[in-house]
Each structure stands twice: as structure tokens, then as C-alpha cells.
Amino acid sequence: MLKTYREMREIDVIPYCEERTEGKEKILYLNWAKCMDLLHENGAEVVYFEPVKNPTTGSSLISSGFTFKDSKDNTNSVYETAVHIVIDDKEFDFQGPVMNGANPVKDNSMSQQRLWNSQCRLFVKGVAIHTGLGFDLWLDNEEKEQKVQKQEDTFHDIMKVRERVLQEFTTLNKRGLGKAEIAEMIGMTEDDLDMKFKMYASLANMEKKLVEALRPLK
């Protein structure tokens, strides 16, 4: 018989964890197989999980109905998956988004491996919530992932944005389009185009001076 929630929560899973990097944060995670081993070592007789299939499509990849746009303005669906978890007499489904770190997976980078990774993550997280095993690890990771997401949402390097825009301009240029033609395509004059590119450097310089001005006030 599996130990109580309190007893399972007291198990130190850190020595069994592996590490991945998200932004500047080091995220520890418990491998699904080791999670299963720890459940068996602490009294569970039967432990397994399996993907929950969409009854209409037969696929375990579920569209949430929401969309988001990436840096190239492509529209992507937000996907989810779910697993059915069995631990002795406990049986429950656990559903969540298919993620790439702190971000949803884009359509053009979706793969069976990403789907499998997501299902393994849901198993370990479901176990933590329902049994207590590794629960404190998830609390710490959730806090770090939220911090990473906040940094990505609120801070973007202006010159990196310029570099991305310039790459797109260069791609069109390599296909035989001159500056005047590109400018006309996007509803600008050549002078407008030059001015827009100069604005990135101007904004970056302004931001740098603002940061310097704020430093003595902190």
C-alpha cells in the first residue's frame, strides 16, 4: 500500500532529478521512470499511465481551440494532451498544454517526441498533486517558469528585433527585390524604410540612457 500523502511529500526527490535550462533559470525535473520506481519503492503495487485519445480523431493531441502568433506573425494552435494515471486503487486523468519550456509548441515544431515529453511531464505532475511525491519540486519549478515567462513577456532586446526584421528584409532582397520594391510592397517609401531601421538604434540608445538614469535611484 502506498504511503500517505504527507509521507510521500517528505521524500527528497532532488538526488534523482535531472536539470534543464530555461532562460537564466535551472529547472530540475524528475524522470517519469524514476517517478514510477519511487512509487513502487514506497508501497505501490500497480503504477502506469497511458495517453487519453480523442474519441473523434483517435489522436492524443488535442486542440484547445485557442491560437497565438509567433515572431513571424504565423498563427499557431494551442495544443493539449492528457494521460490516464493508475496507482493501485487510484485512477485519474490529467490534462495540460504541450509546451516548449515556458512557451506553447508552434505548429511547425510539433513532433511525437514533444507530445511524449508532455505526457511524461503530466504523469509526474499528476503524481505530485495526487500523492505528494515531488510536490515541493513542482512548487519551485512553477515559480521559476513563471519568472522566465514574465521576463520573455516584458523584456525584448530592441536590437534583436531589428536583427530579425533585417533578416526578413534580406531574404526578400536575395530574391531579387530592390529596396524601392520592398518598400512599396509594405506601403512605405525608401526614406520611410531607412528611417524605421534607424529608429531601432535610437530607441536602444534611449533605453540605455534611461537604465543609467534609474541606476542611482535604486
Image (cartoon, rainbow, N blue to C red):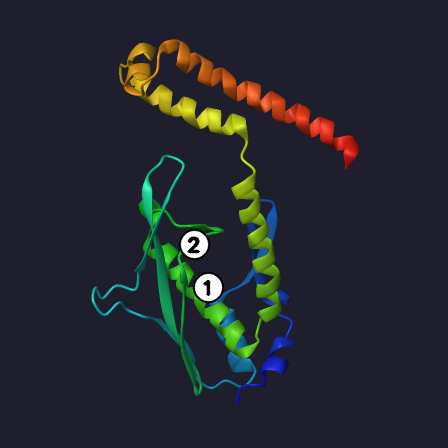
Q: Residues within 10 Å of mark 1 (few under 14, many from 20)?
A: many
Residue at the image position 51 percent from the left and 77 percent from the top: 130
Left or right: residue 37 versus residue 77 is right
- Which numbered tag is attached to residue 121? 1
Q: Amino acid at mark 1?
A: Arg
* Residue 41 vs residue 53, the one in the foreground: 53
| 168 relative to 181, above or below | below
| 200 relative to 105, above or below | above
First in residue order: circle 2 vs circle 1: 2
Left or right: residue 27 versus residue 103 is right
In the picture, residue 63 is in which quadrant? bottom left
x and y, in percent, of residue 55 in the image: 23, 70
Residue at the image position 75 percent from the left and 32 percent from the top: 215
Residue at the image position 34 percent from the left and 16 percent from the top: 188
x and y, in percent, of residue 184 in the image: 29, 15
Dot 2 and dot 1 residues touching (CB under 8 Å): yes
Secondary structure of residue under mark 2 = strand
Residue at the image position 71 percent from the left and 27 percent from the top: 212
x and y, in percent, of residue 4 in the image: 59, 85
Task: Please say whether residue 9 is visible from this viewpoint.
Answer: yes
Left or right: residue 11 versus residue 91 is right
Secondary structure of residue under mark 1 = helix
Task: Please say whether residue 22 is visible from this viewpoint.
Answer: no
Q: Which residue ends up furthest to the left in the rendered image? A: 56
In the picture, residue 8 is in which quadrant? bottom right
- In the picture of the structure, the residue carrying the numbered disc 2 is 99
Q: Residues within 10 Å of mark 2 (few under 14, many from 20)?
A: some
x and y, in percent, of residue 218 in the image: 77, 37
| 141 relative to 93, above or below | above
* Residue 138 vs residue 1, the one in the foreground: 138
